[in-house]
Image (cartoon, rainbow, N blue to C red):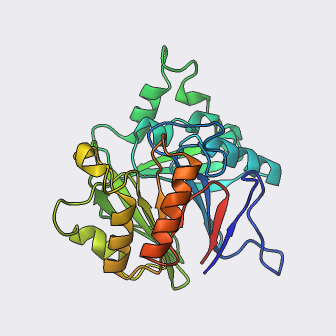
Amino acid sequence: MNVRSTINPAQPPAQDGAGGVSPFVMRFWGVRGSIASPGPATVRYGGNTACIEVRCGGTHIVFDCGTGIRPLGESLSREGGPVDIDLLLTHSHLDHISGLPFFAPAFDPASRIRLWAGHLPPERPFRTVLADMMTAPLFPVPVEIFRADCQFRDFQAGQTLELAPDVVVRTCRLNHPDGATGYRVEHGGRSLCILTDTEHPADGRDPVILDLLRGADLMVYDSTYTDAEYPSRVGWGHSTWQECLRLAEAAGVGRAVIFHHDPARTDDALDVIAAEAEAMRPGSLVAREGMEFFL
C-alpha cells in the first residue's frame, strides 16, 4: 500500500505510470467532526468536515458530504465532463451532509448521483431528511434545485451492496445517536473499511464491527477523543484514537487511520497524536486533507 499526502487538496487524484487513475485510491477531502474549523491552527490537517473519495476500477464512491465535498466538486468540475457517483452516507447529522447543496456535480444535468443511506427508518428516508434541511428559513433553495439525476436509495445497515460486478460494499450498524452505518469496500482482493461516528463498548469490542474489519488492508476510524478525554464524553457516540489502534490490532487490520478530529484539536496537537500513534502501532497515520492511499 502506497501513501502520499499532498499539500494542495484541490489537486486531482494522482495517476499511475500508465496515465490512468490507480485502480483503488482513497483520498481525504474533509477530516473533521462536529463542525468545520478553518483557521491558522488547523491549516495543515484541514478544517473541513467529513468527505472521503474512493475510486476502484471504474467505480467512483464518495463517503459523506460534509463541507469537504465542496472542494471535491470543484476538482471534479475541473476534470471536465459529467460524473457518475455513488454517495454513501454514514449518517445524516449536519456535519456529514451540510456540504451537499454546494456540490457542483449535483447541478449538472448530465451527472448521475446515487445517494445511499442505511441508518434511517423506512418512514423517514434520506430524501425527506435532506428536503427538511433545504427548507426555508433554514436554507434558501429546495432540494429540487439539483439538476443531476439524483437517485435516493435507502437500505438497512447490515445489507451488502453491489455497486458494480467487481465492487462489493458490506455494511454494519454503528453505535451513534440517531444511527450510523459502517462500510467495507472490497475490490480486486483488497479491502477498505470506513467506520466513523461510533462509540466503542465499555468492555470488549463489538463483534459485528470486528467481523466487518477482519483482515482489512486499510481502516478509517472515528478517533474524535483521547482515552483521557473519553470518560467525560461517554454516550456521545464517538471513540478514541487509542481504541482505533487497539481495534485494528484485534481485527488484524493492515493500517489504521485516525479520523473525525475534534474541531478544537489543533495541528500541533494532532502532530503529538501522530507521534504517539506511530509508537503504539507503527504505520498508523492521522488523516489530513489531501492525503491519498493507493491500495
x 48%, y 14%: residue: 137
Expressed as whole percent of the image width and height from the top left, the position of residue 257 reads 49, 66
Which residue occupies the foreground of this view, 112 or 29?
29
Q: Which image quadrant: the N terminus?
A: bottom right
Q: Compared to 155, does 217 lie above or below?
A: below
Q: Is residue 204 left or right of residue 162?
A: left
The answer to whether residue 121 of the structure is visible from this angle is no
State the image quarter where residue 170 is shown.
Answer: bottom left
Q: Residue furthest bottom?
A: 189
Which residue occupies the foreground of this view, 290 or 143?
290
Expressed as whole percent of the image width and height from the top left, the position of residue 252 reads 37, 82
Q: Is residue 237 left or right of residue 108?
A: left
Expressed as whole percent of the image width and height from the top left, the position of residue 127 reads 44, 37
Q: Compared to 182, does 165 lie above or below?
A: below
Q: Compared to 36, does 272 lie above or below?
A: below
Q: Is residue 279 left or right of residue 84?
A: left
State the image quarter where residue 26 is shown.
Answer: bottom right
Expressed as whole percent of the image width and height from the top left, the position of residue 81 reads 79, 52
Q: Which image quadrant: the C terminus?
A: bottom right
x 51%, y 59%: residue: 272
Q: Compared to 95, does 240 lie above or below?
A: below
Which residue occupies the foreground of this view, 292 or 154?
292
Number of dots carrying numbers: 0
Q: Is residue 22 left or right of residue 277?
A: right
The answer to whether residue 289 of the structure is visible from this angle is yes
Q: Residue furthest top?
A: 137
